[in-house]
Image: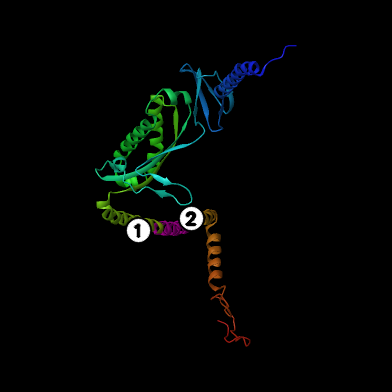
Amino acid sequence: MKNVTPSKAAAWLKPTTAIIVAAVVVVLALSGTSFYIVDQTEEAVVTRFGRYLETTGPGMHYKLPFGIDKHYPVKTRVVQTEQFGFRTLKAGVETVYSSDSYSEESTMLTGDLNIVDVEWIIQYRIVDPKAWLFNVQERIQTIRDVSQSVINQLVGDRAILDVIGQERSAIEAEGMQLMNDQLKSYGLGISIIAVKLQNIVPPQGVQQSFEDVNKAIQDMNRLINEGKESYNKEIPKAQGEADRLVQVAQGYASERVNRARGDVARFNSVYEEYRKAPEVTRRRLYLEMIEEVFKKAEGTALIDRNFKNFLPMKNLGTSGGAK
């Protein structure tokens, strides 16, 4: 067996060590550029030589190394927000807003030619990562421009009192629909899920006067509501009383009509009997009349005027005698 001198061993180890180091570097490079992890809130768009290949979901995935395949994570499961007319510096238990003015975003002209400051937010979610990455270059600015255009249009179609009051929810719903339609036509790959109007106030110069007008309108509405309340309280009561009187009158009318019909029927019945036997009927009617007249009289005796040999005697058991 040949003896290997230290100098020859060192010369042999140098290229071997270099090869091992290079192999390790290659393996690390392959590992670092071949695998990627997608977060639970994201999806990844993979390209090969700059051309779209596929979209992958959360988890660990493999791709071709050394930049042949590239992945671009997109937060598709996160609701993102854009603010208009104001900025939030710190959110949480105590929200801090920026003191800067953004009147170029919030100042608008209403349909009745009044100026109003409108602050609002939109919330959206990315629904098509491929379209989000490749279809539009200035994505955020496009979203903001479309939102401002739509809100300006809707505010400009309405009077200032409608914008501040009853039309707020209509503006939000219609604004979300219009924004989605326009952004879909651009192929931006997002969906607007909420439009919320925040502060809607007149400009500083006329704010006090506007508040006075608004207070007067509120007082007017309060008085109208109070009047309606009194109306709703008294009118049913009066209507019930009227219905009661009508029912009483109808009952009285029915009673009188039925009584009259009964009298007519009784008269006709008596008349028929009278036609059959006039003398007997006449006497019966006479006796009935006498009985009706004297039925409540006490201590009275009826005697035929032609009766002879009648001796009137005083009834001692009564206060008066026979009559």
**Amino acid at circle 1:** Leu
Q: Main secondary structure of the magenta part?
A: helix
Q: Identify the residue at image location x=38%, y=36%.
A: 175
Image quadrant assignment for residue 60: top right
User: Is the residue marked by circle 2 packed among few (<14), some (14-19), or many (20+) residues within 10 Å?
Assistant: few
Residue at the spot of label 1: 223
Q: Identify the residue at image location x=55%, y=73%.
A: 294
Of the pair 18 and 164, the residue shown nearer to us: 18
Q: What number is the disc on residue 254?
A: 2
**Quadrant placement of the C terminus:** bottom right
Q: Could you tell me how far apart the alpha carbons at marks 2 and 1 are, in whole angstroms?
A: 46 Å
**Amino acid at circle 2:** Ser
Q: Position of residue 113 (x, y in %)?
A: 24, 43
Q: Is residue 262 above or below residue 38?
A: below
Q: Which badge, 2 or 1, is on the more N-terminal residue?
A: 1
Q: Which residues are magenta?
A: 230-255
Q: Is residue 306 above or below residue 41?
A: below
Of the pair 11 and 36, the residue shown nearer to us: 11
Image quadrant assignment for residue 148: top left
Q: Position of residue 240 (x, y in %)?
A: 45, 57
Image quadrant assignment for residue 107: top left
Residue 245 falls inside the magenta stretch:
yes
